[in-house]
Image: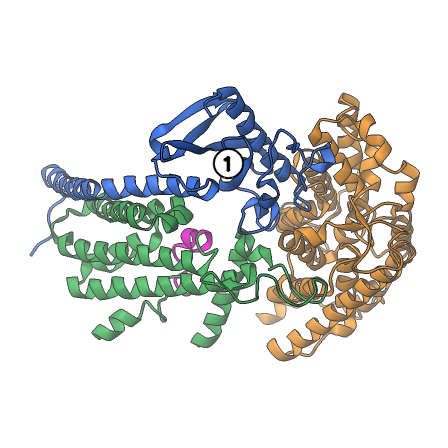
Amino acid sequence: MAKVESNFKNMTATLLVITLVASAALGLVYQSTMEPIDLAQQAKINNAIKAVLPEFDNQPGNEAYSVAVDGGELTFYLATKDGQPVGTAVKTFSNNGFAGLIELMVGFLPDGTINKVAVISHKETPGLGDKIEPQKSEFSVQFEGKSPENFKLLVKKDGGDVDAITASTITSRAYCDALARAYNELKKGGKQ
Amino acid sequence: MSKVAQLTKGILRENPIFVLVLGMCPTLATTSSAFNGMGMGLATTFVLLSSNVVISAIARFIPDKVRIPSYIVVIATFVTIVDLVMQAYATKLYESLGIFIPLIVVNCIVLGRAEAFANKNTIFDSLLDGLGMGIGFTFALTLLGSVREMLGNFSIFGLPIIPKEPFWLKEVFFHDPILVFVLAPGAFIALAYLIAIFNRFKK
Amino acid sequence: MDSKLVVSPSPHVHSGESTRRLMFNVVLALMPAFAVSLYYFGIGALFVTLLSILSCVLFEYLIQKFILKVQPTITDGSAIVTGLLFAFNVPSNLPWYIVVTGSLFAIGVAKMSFGGLGSNPFNPALAARVFMLISFPVQMTSWPLPIESRLKYIDAVTGPTPLAILKEGLKKGDTISQIADQIPSHLQLFMGVMGGSLGEISALALLIGFAWLLYKKVITWRIPISIFATIFVFTGILWLINPEQNADPIFHLVTGGVMIGAIYMATDYVTSPMHPKGMLIFGLGIGLLTVIIRVWGAYPEGVSFAILIMNAFVPLINRYVKPKRFGEEVKRNG
């Protein structure tokens, strides 16, 4: 069979057919993956909340509210069990990381003490700043069970109570900055 | 060329990474661990295989002047499918590969095989070619990822090869891995040595 | 046809220079700095230096003998210089396995992979130093304090370098006068009483070595002096604009790796331009990059990065600034 000639009519028709078929196929795939993708997204948020709060039985993702602060946004997730509040997870951030933005999820118990902290995203140097990740070092453990009321969220070098990561003072400062921001907003919000 | 050779040429003799040196961007960027390398390799294999088959089937009906845009549309469709499916069912891998999944569209190997092979061969040969090239690519990425993970993280597929808290003293032997290998410069160094070794044994 | 290509107006006169003699002079010129280092850092300095030299020479021998299968050339002394310079660029409490890994990197990756002495585009000791810095950031940036650490190796008392104090302080929002009392005086810095890599601390000792190299005509003044001048002028301008945010030029000259980098690393024959004018361009580039990294970069010190970056430009500089060919007419002024 001879090759199809490259005239205007043939070219238009070919491209039209190919793009039509392609978009139809994509539409189909999109339809069928929409729900799993939503579920996966929700599971991700829920997992992050689960990692920092005691057990809960509601869907904190549905009872979230956001506050714009310092050029960014803090999101508060309220967790309850049998209708009783068990804590608030706060998605917080700091722009002062060694490589820019650091996003954390902090779990506060109803009395304002920090339950646990998880890292959502960061671009810190591997081997130095990435020790803020709980699986990489013990750094984040020192915050557990402490109330920012009497545990000063500053590195020791700046007169606070936090043991900075060796050779990563800047990252440690940014981490404290994110925690302090979450705590201050939590107190202001008064939605405990 | 026999059907078997059609399949195996992509694995060793014409390995896309070690011999053709194509698709360097995902190769260097996604091989920070063996698992990521393998995930990237498998995603690319799927795209390569499907686009090769489809393109060899429709190549006859496409006018020459619009063949490249047509191929790209076909490839982009398959890449988007992979993107959506991974997002739904392999969220963790999807996050660590990030932007490099959509970038498979511009991977030289995919368009290269479409232009150099699929549009002038039968569907079955194109299928074998795509599969072989995909296996070769996956093999290379997994190998590179393993080497980098072993040196740069002291683990392979996430399993530590040196215990996290070794029993020996910090002063006596390595406690911390050689970080440079999980960073960009390490990718170039590891790839260069793998190519050198590969060439030495190919002779 | 072939005979046309042979240019051979014999007899030739041998200049008496050999790689071995050059390397010997470089080693000799580094001895004052080594003595200072032994005085301040004691056994740590001795151990790291010996280990580094030994492993560099051993790796060169093993690679040439068993992988490249050529006659080993360890007697030319270039591996000794690489080992010595690598040791001079690391802290004196560096664990032994990092010293050995660094030596393997210097000789194996940065030198032999490119074809050995004369073919390497980057200074092997510096390349190794930078790769170890990226790989082991904690160990490579914990600097033993001078004198206190004399009798200690691994358990040395550590503290930040003056440049790190400066960077840290400025980042926190302090001014120069607030930071000043944490930093030793200029005279102390000149003598080398500060934390730092074991061979880079004493500007005085390194300058004595510089004088020796100039006297022996091993190197010319162009690269080191153009680096010093660029750093002095650039930081001088910044200092005049705002003395509360920028350290003075003398401070920048005597701290960190400026002296050892400019005198011993940037002047490496293999990785620096051939033409006098090219050398000045090369020095200017290193000076500018060093200051840019120090003032605006993430790392407190940038000499090694600056030299490596400019190493990459050497082929380009050599292409545009060519030495006159032998026999070509040289224009004289006036």
Position in image of residue B125 (x %, y %): 19, 66
Q: Chain of mark 1?
A: A
Position in image of residue B86 (x %, y %): 30, 49
Residue beneath label 1, please? A106
Q: Is residue B77 left or right of residue C125?
A: left
Q: Image quadrant for the N terminus of chain C?
A: bottom right
Q: Is residue B120 left or right of residue B155?
A: left
**What colour is chain C?**
orange
Closest to the observer, A180 or A143: A143
Tell me, yes or no, if residue C181 can be seen here: yes
- Inspect the image, locate mark 1, and give the three-letter code of the amino acid beneath it: Val
Which residue is at 77% across, 49% downward?
A: C261
- Name the image quarter holding residue B134: bottom left
Q: Is residue A16 left or right of residue B192?
A: left
Position in image of residue B71 (x %, y %): 23, 48
Tell me, yes or no, if residue A122 can be seen here: no
Q: Is residue B22 magenta?
A: yes
- Name the image quarter holding residue B40: bottom left
Q: According to the colouring, which chain is blue?
A: A
Q: Which range is magenta?
A: B19-29
**What colour is chain B?**
green
Q: Is residue B198 magenta?
A: no
Q: Is residue C330 left or right of residue C42?
A: left
Q: Is residue B42 above or below residue A96?
A: below
Q: Is residue A189 above or below residue B10?
A: above
